[in-house]
């Protein structure tokens, strides 16, 4: 942003702060504001002013009125009397500029002057944002804070001219989410003008000027004739997507295919030319940007079949010749319809997929046509013009994706574009002279709110961003949505969300994506969990009216992916444990089911509860169960798990590469009880999994023993056996004993004879031990490589066993006595 | 619980469900209930009935009234006409029983008959709980749900007799929390009768009958004469703590020490005997349990100094002789004051600390005296009677702790007692015949809510608990506090909280408690984080009026410990990184400060925001910065951290025992840029830490290089260098190259020449790679053991470096290319 002069906005919630000397315009709660718009002004400006009037109601409680004795006057040079409010110098600053405004604040008036219609509109919405209305107030339910006083200090302000001429979005891949939501919200089976009015308003508030409408099943032009008129009136320049030439929606062809015949210029040229001509006639009098060129039927190569690109046999040379012919004819139609040379009407030719290869092979298009480059759908640009190419008159554009349908997998569900990736490639794009058209594929629009803002802000002024200040943008955006106090934390979470979600997509991910054995998988899950905790903490710290916005912009995506990661991790754990016969696998199988159900529940909350159900249908994208890029499966699919039969004992521990084997007491190979007793697992007891005790404590322990089986590496000569028991005191007066045997050797341990308050014990042994709540005793016994069995026999009742560590050289002290070693489990016969 | 007959309560929120045939008593919203209490009834019963009347208001909206034509009639055998409502058989069931009630529900009446005063009271509160009022409704703000209809099916019900005769709590260590809260709430500098009325009510609702009052700075008997009268009236049997003999508060001596002189029976016997006599006179006509014996001045050994137990030189034989003499004199006083043999008045002698040793050394007390054993303050019992000892007439008691002040460290802040530990030791205690008195040290009472319930429920019927059904109690308790739908998850979290918090206490913990290097420390932090996430999720799923209860019973303790673990982990990370000169240490130092501040903020929320500030002062316990058991430090102390000066480069990587060295691109040893460029760190970019690129991309890369220093184990002959870059496409048409050099050898890599949509690449290379967003290239180069330097030189602009892995035998593929190896950092000179 370029400050021509000092411009300070001071939002005071209770009483006005007296600003030193400087004059200011002040708005007060409940006091109506008057806006003046000249009668000769563009209708689009009047519509923006009407929105501003409503914004004042959101902030002060009273809608602004229109009249002559106005505080706010907005107008476009040449379309109103606004020039009379400007100095010669100010006029000179505006004249001939593109989409620029000046805002003059002077004690009792605010003058917004635009160099053209959109300049004025952007100025108006700029004032909206400054009184506290987020561009996302409707599309993300960002609450508008009411103030008693708002002061806007004297000064003159402008955002300058945009760096990129056409800046906009592409609503794409709009089923089921956008389609369903529009049906639920507007009652239409298509995107009609009520819907597009909301989209256009958002774009203008974001200082965009361009869009490609949704075109999977919808036809912008044909569905609702008001659509096109509304765009022109409000100031949005429409285009058609990269494979829809001559201002026609592909659906216009599809719906009348019986009548039109085949979409093949080789064989059906006359019909297609007529089809093109009608599009051009319809677009003749507006600003719409004409897409030229041609691809096959649908979003596929000429000669290919939509959805079957992998079967396509390229036929480049023939296609190139045909394409040159097509473009030549399209230009003739343009000339004929507009009555002017073709180069007078802006056109764009998209180098998408195979079309880029045609260009590289030498296919030429007229110099006035903008060539639209693209990324690889994953955020890396495929081609940039070299110095010579940059000279072309029509310039260059970039078609960039934050939503994608195609190979290897769709990314339609959540935003998966790291902030840094978008910035890095778009700054590269701009550095290579691509500044005619930037268009962003945003899927259903939600939940791509932040990438849309970032992309469009970069399109306005790419040079203001660099690696060190990039996240200031994120923070500033969060401040607009959640307030200054919440901005740092919200931005931190949003940035980490974008980073983590960019590692792989929900659609690509499965239980093998991350490495289980090295702990990588649990690590990434824990990162998500931490992020979710932090998002939940922040959620609770917000005022209730902020929570819907926070949920959709931050909390939901974080929770959804945190849960998905837990689900696939649980699947990985399940399959791994099941393969070893460990019935702990069943816990993880249950957890897969819990996560799968929670995924659906989170989606349901987004659709049905958040914002009182305003976004019903917007979050219905499948994302679990892909096996190809195509999402033609009926519903999310529960990941496969395996169940293992549960039984007691039977655990064996293969040698552990860490150099020690850690065994939870309940994972014995076999257990023999004494008369009237039972080896009893006490779930959750102790530092890690559980504890095991011979109960009841009033019976004799004669003959009772726990046996543990483990393998030792060849060459082992002895082991240190660490037995960890609960710090039971010698309540029997004589202490508690157990015997540890391995082969022929054995040793008896009394672990609590000094756990008393006698002077010689109290400070040295007793206090430190009782506070640890466990006693670790170490017994060294001879052992040999291969399979061994250790026998632990209690000699007094009341001993609670927690863990056994067999150290053959690698163990180092740790509070939890090491993660348990991997076990295999098989019934004893 | 023992069901004499079918008893079903059916809570119906909207319409009454017609129960098959069975009759029932029904209460309706808004319809007043009448209760009958005979005029000759105990006052304590009338008080409980008054509370029941208020409970009806909580549930039906209308307070119950008292009158003759009553639905509910409650009374005590021998103190009312209640017998006239019972059959001969029912009377026989009650007569001679201790604290037992029968509840008869019969179409239009509920009869509650008690064998004695407390039996009737327990019956009354049992009805309260059954209409949906938690015993914790006031002490934990558990909301009472209103119903349109409540039906209680016909039948007769009883809880039977309690297994343990005296069951209660000890309010202890009551400063600063309880003391501050009482001051804020009741305006008194002591616990007065308004405060104790709330405590007594809670105890009776929990079917307890006994307590030791707080005695640090308060004097139950002296502070407010109403206290003792109220206890007797309401039905609570008072005792004095283990070192306050003869029904006197230690404060009564302390406050008049000038007058009384020294607390030494050897030299000041007459004064002390008079002191004892006054206590006995005061207690003559109530049920209070008389503590006998004597310890030193305050909670210390005779001859010791309070707070200086470690300096105490034992003098056992002399003290034993003195103690026998003291007890003999105390018994004389009892006989004299009561006018009956001493064995007619229940007495207790506590074997606490050194006193247990006196017993073991042979000190004898009369057979009618109850001997009170104790745990080690950490939940393990020190001694249990053998079969012979069990025969003593006075029986045995257990003094058990869930709050503790003493060595090695206090545990005064939060509950740190695992559910399993409490159960395991108390079932042991009961199995060894200790059933006369169970008293639980509960500190400030809050936040020990669940252990109090569990302990008192076990005291009523210990045999009903076993290892497999223990957590049913937790679940049932959660169902009472949070409702059936929330009970499973709340109980799961409460159990895990108790387990994790029992590993070590907040006061014991520091940055060395868990092992950092093995990942143990981060693992336990992640467990806490997961628990916090789950608690937060549940918190949000609750109805708003349930949230205060959930916060105090579950969410706050989880969040407080989760944060504390993160703080000490951050400190461990800080000190570890700082020792290696890594300025990442500073992030962790900041995080220690954030966590420290958050700890205070969580406490503030508990005191000031939760329940609208009702618990102001209750959560003010210091818990960070202990260096001895004593908490005589002015305030929580920020853990020590170290700051490291930040500078670019200088990173060296010692050989990594994993067999590979993983290096984040920004951790170079040195970096040389080309003209007009700068090596730019892009924070957060890429899969792990960040990315590094030579910017701007429009300048030549001539001469630019990144250098990485690392050590190789002796014997290394070659290494595989994995270079991970962002999957930048060949936007320049010719591809992007970098050179990797090690010593004299080098190799040039073009990592993106096949990243295009040409048919031979698109499905095999392009799609899989772009979706991964990184390209990993592997270069094998000769190398030698010792320090090496690798040089990476970009030959085209636009390459973004993410990570370098030097594999000398141990690397296995993983998505994030391995955790970074440990580095040391030193400025280059």
Image (tube, coloured by chain):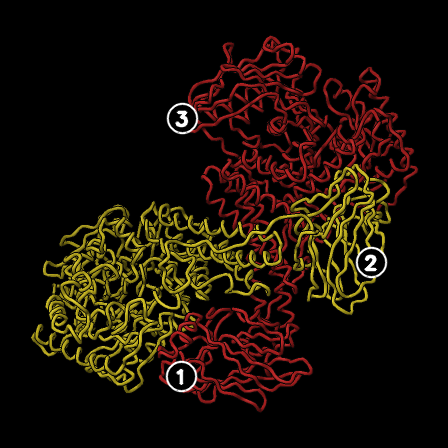
Chain colours: A red, B yellow
**Residue B432's image quarter?**
bottom left
Residue A785, numbered label? none
Query: Can you identify the residue that label 2 sits on?
Result: B743
Q: Look at discs 2 and 3 and give the one toward the viewer.
A: 2
Q: Label 3 crowding class (10 Å Cα cut-off): few <14, some 14-19, many 20+? A: few
* Left or right: residue B43 compared with residue B608: left
**Residue B350 horizontal/vertical position (percent):** 25, 74
| Secondary structure category for the residue under label 3 | loop
What is the number of callouts on the image?
A: 3
What's the residue at 26%, 52% (across, down)? B182
Q: CA distance from mark 1 to mark 2?
A: 66 Å
Same chain, marks 3 and 1?
yes
Within-10-Å neighbours for mark 1: few <14, some 14–19, many 20+: some
- Vertical relation: A710 (above or below) B515: below
Give the mark nearer the N terminus: 3 vs 1: 3
Residue position for label 3: A15
Mark 1 highlights which residue?
Answer: A735
Question: Which residue occupies 51% across, 78% down?
Answer: A723
Q: Note whether residue B209 is visible.
A: yes
Left or right side of A658 for B444: left
Dot 2 alpha-carbon crowd within 10 angstroms: few under 14, some 14 to 19, many 20 or more = few
Q: Is residue B166 above or below residue A429?
A: below
Residue B703: image quadrant is top right
Q: Is residue B650 left or right of residue B440?
A: right
Mark 1 lies on a secondary structure that is loop
Q: Nearer the viewer, residue B378 or A622?
A: B378
Q: Chain of mark 1?
A: A
Q: At 48% across and 51% down in the image, what residue appears? A: B595
Residue that appears at 46% across and 37% down: A545
């Amino acid at each position: 942003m370029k400050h021509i002069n000092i411009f300070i906005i001071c939002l005071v919630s209770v009483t006005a702060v007296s600003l030193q000397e400087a004059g200011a315009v002040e708005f007060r709660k409940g006091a109506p504001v008057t806006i003046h718009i000249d009668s000769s002004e563009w209708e689009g400006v009047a519509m923006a002013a009407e929105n501003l009037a409503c914004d004042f109601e959101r902030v002060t409680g009273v809608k602004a009125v229109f009249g002559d004795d106005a505080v706010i006057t907005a107008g476009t040079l040449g379309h109103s009397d606004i020039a009379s409010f400007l100095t010669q110098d100010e006029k000179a600053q505006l004249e001939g500029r593109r989409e620029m405004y000046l805002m003059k604040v002077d004690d009792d008036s605010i003058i917004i002057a635009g160099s053209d219609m959109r300049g004025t509109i952007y100025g108006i919405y700029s004032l909206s944002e400054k009184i506290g209305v987020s561009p996302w107030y409707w599309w993300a339910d960002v609450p508008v804070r009411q103030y008693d006083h708002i002061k806007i200090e004297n000064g003159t302000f402008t955002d300058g001219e945009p760096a990129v001429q056409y800046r906009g979005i592409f609503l794409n891949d709009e089923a089921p989410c956008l389609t369903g939501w529009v049906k639920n919200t507007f009652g239409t089976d298509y995107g009609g003008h009520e819907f597009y009015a909301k989209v256009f308003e958002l774009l203008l508030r974001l200082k965009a000027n361009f869009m490609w409408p949704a075109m999977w099943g919808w036809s912008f032009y044909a569905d609702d004739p008001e659509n096109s008129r509304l765009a022109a009136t409000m100031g949005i320049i429409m285009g058609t997507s990269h494979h829809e030439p001559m201002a026609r929606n592909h659906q216009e062809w599809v719906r009348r295919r019986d009548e039109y015949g085949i979409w093949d210029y080789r064989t059906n040229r006359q019909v297609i030319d007529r089809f093109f001509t009608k599009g051009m006639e319809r677009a003749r009098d507006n600003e719409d940007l004409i897409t030229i060129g041609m691809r096959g039927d649908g979003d596929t190569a000429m000669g290919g079949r939509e959805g079957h690109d992998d079967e396509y046999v390229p036929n480049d040379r023939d296609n190139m010749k045909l394409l040159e012919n097509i473009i030549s004819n399209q230009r003739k139609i343009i000339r004929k319809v507009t009555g002017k040379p073709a180069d007078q009407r802006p056109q764009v030719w998209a180098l998408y997929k195979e079309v880029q290869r045609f260009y590289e092979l030498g296919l030429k298009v007229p110099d006035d046509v903008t060539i639209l480059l693209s990324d690889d759908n994953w955020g890396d640009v495929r081609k940039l013009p070299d110095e010579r190419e940059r000279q072309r008159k029509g310039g260059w554009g970039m078609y960039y994706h934050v939503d994608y349908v195609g190979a290897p997998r769709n990314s339609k569900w959540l935003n998966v574009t790291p902030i840094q990736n978008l910035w890095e490639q778009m700054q590269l794009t701009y550095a290579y002279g691509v500044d005619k058209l930037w268009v962003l594929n945003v899927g259903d629009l939600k939940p791509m709110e932040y990438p849309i803002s970032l992309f469009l802000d970069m399109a306005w002024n790419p040079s203001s961003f660099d690696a060190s200040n990039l996240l200031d943008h994120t923070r500033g955006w969060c401040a607009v949505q959640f307030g200054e106090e919440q901005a740092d934390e919200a931005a931190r979470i949003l940035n980490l969300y974008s980073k983590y979600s960019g590692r792989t997509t929900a659609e690509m991910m499965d239980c093998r994506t991350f490495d289980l054995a090295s702990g990588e998988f649990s690590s990434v899950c824990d990162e998500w969990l931490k992020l979710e905790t932090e998002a939940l903490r922040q959620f609770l710290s917000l005022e209730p009216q902020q929570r819907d916005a926070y949920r959709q912009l931050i909390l939901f995506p974080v929770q959804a992916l945190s849960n998905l990661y837990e689900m696939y991790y649980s699947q990985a754990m399940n399959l791994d444990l099941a393969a070893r016969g460990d019935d702990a696998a069943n816990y993880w199988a249950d957890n897969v089911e819990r996560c799968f159900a929670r995924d659906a529940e989170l989606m349901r909350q987004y659709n049905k509860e958040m914002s009182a159900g305003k976004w019903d249908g917007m979050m219905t994208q499948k994302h679990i169960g892909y096996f190809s890029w195509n999402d033609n499966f009926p519903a999310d699919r529960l990941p496969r798990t395996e169940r293992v039969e549960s039984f007691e004992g039977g655990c064996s521990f293969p040698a552990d590469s860490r150099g020690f084997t850690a065994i939870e007491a309940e994972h014995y190979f076999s257990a023999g009880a004494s008369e009237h007793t039972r080896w009893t697992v006490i779930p959750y007891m102790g530092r890690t999994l559980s504890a095991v005790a011979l109960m009841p404590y009033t019976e004799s322990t004669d003959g009772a023993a726990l046996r543990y089986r483990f393998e030792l590496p060849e060459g082992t000569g002895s082991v240190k056996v660490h037995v960890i028991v609960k710090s039971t005191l010698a309540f029997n007066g004589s202490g508690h004993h157990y015997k540890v045997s391995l082969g022929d050797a054995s040793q008896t341990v009394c672990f609590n004879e000094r756990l008393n308050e006698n002077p010689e014990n109290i400070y040295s042994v007793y206090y430190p031990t009782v506070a640890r709540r466990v006693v670790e005793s170490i017994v060294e016994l001879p052992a040999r490589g291969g399979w061994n069995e250790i026998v632990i026999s209690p000699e007094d009742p009341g001993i609670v066993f927690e863990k056994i560590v067999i150290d053959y050289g690698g163990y180092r002290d740790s509070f939890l006595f090491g993660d348990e070693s991997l076990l295999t489990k098989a019934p004893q016969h």
